[in-house]
Image: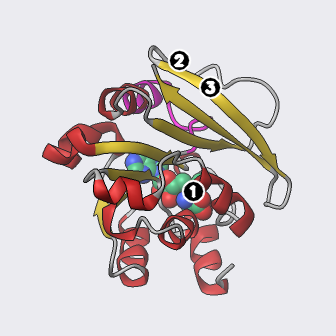
Amino acid sequence: MRPLEAIKFFVKYICAPRRTGAVCPSSRFLSRKMAQGVGIGATEAHSENKVVVELGAGTGAVTQALVDSGYADILRSIEFDSSLFDILSDRFPNVKVMRANAEHLREVLGLESERVCAVVSSLPLVSLPKDCVENIVSEIEAVLPKGGHYVQYTYKIIGKNKNVRFKSLRKVSSNIVLLNIPPARVDVYEKI
Ligand SMILES: C[S@@+](CC[C@H](N)C(=O)[O-])C[C@H]1O[C@@H](n2cnc3c(N)ncnc32)[C@H](O)[C@@H]1O
């Protein structure tokens, strides 16, 4: 964990706890598990001209794992907060980082929304307002093609988030990552 970024992240949490949703950035173990959920290898995704979308990139813990997995130039990392967006832009000059609201995903991606193969989300769906979560979920379902993966972590290790209802996604795997503060569960869904 990068100390300065961890401090900035914690300050964000103090200022906007529901939107930030975590006290510190994800560990490399959680971040790697998120990147593994993409479901299509970087070489194949490149050759098929696909795009991988990251939602709620924060200071870039999961972004780094996605870059390490070879997705840098097909990655679109979306972050709402302007100072976190600045950190991301400095840290990942080779990634297209966008300052935007995930509730408007199709509009933000424009024509690229037709090329999405996976959505990797760190958004705090448990603490965001219900209508916001509904909008985000319906945007994710709209951009994913059949068989495309949606990857989401949650600190609610047991049970479901009652705010979240899927119309066209089914869960294909669920893994608990203990080496994170706090421990988290990574769920992978597939568009049907
Ligand atoms: C739990 S943090 C995850 C940060 C990072 N991905 C990680 O795992 O360390 C959630 C991030 O989502 C961002 N966020 C919250 N609501 C958002 C929205 N509607 N659109 C885009 N980003 C949002 C917050 O600003 C915050 O940076």
Q: Residue furthest right?
A: 178
Marker count (numbered): 3
Evaluate whether residue 138 shows in this view. yes
> Is residue 178 or residue 68 the one in the foreground?
68
Whichever of callouts 1 and 2 sits on the residue coming sooner in the sequence is 1
Mark 3 within 8 Å of ligand 1, using the beta carbon? no
Q: SS for tag 3?
A: strand
**Distance in Å between CA atoms under marks 1 and 3:** 16 Å
Task: Indicate left or right for 74 with 64 as reference.
Answer: left
- For marks 1 and 3 on the same chain, the one whose residue lies earlier in the sequence: 1
Q: Give me the disc on residue 171.
A: 3
Q: In the rendered structure, find residue 35 and report the number of the disc placed on it.
A: 1
Query: Quick check: is 48 in the magenta stretch?
Result: no
Q: Which of marks 1 and 2 is in front?
A: 1
Q: Residue type at mark 2? A: Arg
Range covered by the magenta-colored residues: 124-136
Identify the residue at image location x=29%, y=41%. 105
Please tell me whether residue 30 is drawn above or below residue 60 in the rendered image: above
Q: Can residue 80 be seen in this view?
A: no
Q: What element carries label 2?
A: loop
Looking at the rendered structure, the kind of residue marked 1 is Ala
Q: How far apart are the two marked residues, 1 and 2, measured between alpha carbons?
A: 23 Å
Query: In the picture, which quadrant includes the C terminus?
Result: top left
Percent across and percent down for residue 4 are: 61, 85
Q: Mark 2 points at which residue?
A: 165
Q: Quadrant of residue 147?
A: top left
Residue 74 vertical position relative to residue 191 in the rendered view, above or below: below
